[in-house]
Amino acid sequence: MTAPQDKAAGRRSAVLRREAVLAAVPVAVAALLGATGPATAGTAGASGVGDPYFPLSGNGGFHVEHYDLTLGYDTSSRHLDGTAVLTARATQALSRFDLDLKGLKVTGVTVDRAAATFRRSGQELVVTPRHALRDRQQFTITVRYNGTPAPVTDPDGSADGWVPTDDGAFVAGEPQGSMTWFPSNGHPLDKSTYDFTLTVPKGRTAVANGVLRSEHTANGRTTFRWHQAEPMAAYLATATVGNFQVEKYTTPDGIQVYNAVDPREAKEAAPVLKKLPSVLAWESKLFGPYPFRAAGSIVDHADVGYALETQTRPIYDSAPDLSTLVHESAHQWFGDSVALTSWKDIWLNEGFATYAEWLYSEQHGGDSAQKSFDALYARPASSHLWAFPPGNPGSGANIFDTPVYSRGAMTLHELRRAVGDKAFFRILRDWATVHRGGHGTTAQFIALSERVSGKNLGPLFHTWLHTKGKPAKA
Ligand code: ARG
Ligand code: ZN
C-alpha cells in the first residue's frame, strides 16, 4: 500500500472511532435535549465506506437511488458544464455528508431546494444542508459544477475517469474515476439508476449506459438522453463523446443494441461486433438471462490501455478481439449485475470474466479450459502469476494484475474439477440469479458452491484464493 493510502486509512479509522463514540451517546441524552434541540441534528456521514484499498471511495450515511446528470461538453475547449440531481435516502441522521468529486469547480449545492453550504477537501465535496436530515429521509441533492475534467491516475498507473481524446472523451471509471466527472457515492456498494442528458457539438455522439430515449439537434448542438433502468455502480457509468458510426438493432431476445464505433476502428471492429448477439446468447445459456434491457459497444480510438465493462455497453480503446468482447460481456453478469462489496473481492469480477473466455474457446473449437489451465500451471514458481493470491491482492495497485485474472480463473477451473460440470455450471448460474441486480462476496460464493455441490470446499478455496505462492498439484 502506498503512503498516501496509509494516511487516508488512518484518517478513515479516526472517523470510525469518532463515530463509534458518538453512536454510544445514550438515547436519553437526545431525549433530554428535546425534539427541537441539536440532538436531532445527526452526525456527519463518513468520508468513505471504509474500503481497505480505496478508503475514501463512496460515502457514509446515505444511499443514492437515482442520478440525473445533465452535462454539456465542448469538444474543442474541453469545458464541461454539469448539473447533477441525486435522489438519496439517509441511512442515519445526518448533519452533513460527503460526495466524491475531484477537480472541477462547484458553483452551487442545494438539498431539497434549499441552498446548502459546501467545501472541498481532496476528493470529498463536503455538504452541510440547511436542515439536518432524519434517518431514512429521502432527499434531493443538486450540484452545479463546471470546468475541464481530467482523469485520475490509479495506483496501477493507468488513467481513470474522463480521458479527453482528439474528438471528445473516453469515459470510464474503474475503480475510482467517476469522481472526475460527476459528484457520486462512488463505491460499488452503492448502486443506483441513472438518467443522462448529454449535449455535444452537432456531428459528435455522446454515449452513455442503457437505452437511448431521444436525440435532438438545435443551434449546432445535439442532445442525447440515455436511461439506465437497472441499478448500476458509479464506476460503470460512461458518457463517452466522439465521432462515431452508430448502429442500432434489437436482438431476437428483445435486447436493444447500440454500437458506437470510431471510424478509424470500424473495419477491424466490424467482424467482432457482429458476434455480440451470439456471444450474449451463449453467455445467457451458461449464466442465465442477460440482466439488462440494453446492450452494445463503444469502440473508441484512444490510448488508455484497457477496456471496461461499462454497464450494458462496454467501452474499448480500440477495436477489440473476440475474447475481449467475451470478457467484457461476461462482466455484465459478473461485476455489473452482481457487484462487489469490496475491491478486495475483485477476482469475483476478473476471474469469472477470464474463465468465460476459456469456456468460450472450449465450446467454439479452441483450446479447452484444461489446456488454458495447464499452460498457466506450467509457469515456474518464480513467475509473476504466483506473486500474490487472488483473494487477497494486498493493495489497489494489484487489483487488475495477472494473479487476479489468471489465477482467479484457475480457481474456478479447480472448483469445476472438484464438483463436476453439472454442479459447476449450476453454481455459476445460481450465483448470477440469486445476486442479480445486487452484490456478492467471496464468502457467499464459497457458501453457494458448498451448498450446490454438497462438498467441503474450504481447503480448495483457501489454497487457490488465499495461499501465497504456487499451489501444489491437487
Ligand atoms: N475491468 C477491466 C477489465 O475488464 C479493467 C479495468 C482496468 N482499469 C484500470 N484502472 N487499470 O479487465
Ligand atoms: Zn475484466
Image (cartoon, rainbow, N blue to C red):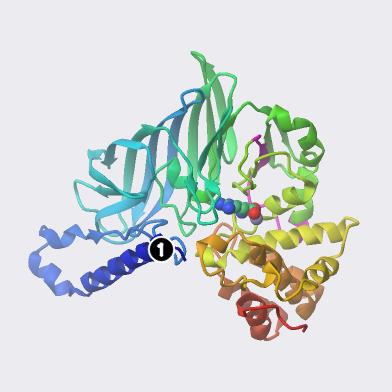
Look at 47% across and 60% down and name the residue there: 189
Look at 54% across and 18% down and name the residue there: 217
Q: Nearer the viewer, residue 81 or 376?
A: 376
Residue furthest out toward the front: 382
Give the image quarter of residue 456. Answer: bottom right
Give amino acid for label 1. Ala
Q: Nearer the viewer, residue 259 or 385?
A: 385
Q: Can the viewer see residue 433 in this picture?
A: no
Q: Can the viewer see residue 436 in this picture?
A: yes
Please name the residue that numbered disc 1 is placed on: 3
Q: Is residue 300 left or right of residue 13?
A: right
Residue range corresponding to the magenta coloring: 284-301
Q: Where is residue 169 in the image (x, y as percent from the top left)?
A: 55, 34
Look at 77% across and 83% down and name the residue there: 473
Q: Where is residue 263 in the image (x, y as percent from the top left)?
A: 71, 27
Residue furthest out toward the top: 219
Asked if the stretch drawn in magenta spans residue 187, the answer is no
38 above or below 161? below
Asked if the stretch drawn in magenta spans residue 286, the answer is yes
115 above or below 200? below
Tell me the SS state at disc 1. helix
Q: In this view, does 205 lie to the left or right of 184?
A: right
432 above or below 72? below
Residue furthest out toward the right: 365
Give the image quarter of residue 345. Answer: bottom right
Q: Where is residue 313 in the image (x, y as percent from the top left)?
A: 64, 43
Q: Is residue 108 left or right of residue 350?
A: left
Q: Is residue 141 left or right of residue 178?
A: left
Look at 17% across and 75% down and name the residue there: 26
Q: Where is residue 400 in the image (x, y as percent from the top left)?
A: 60, 59
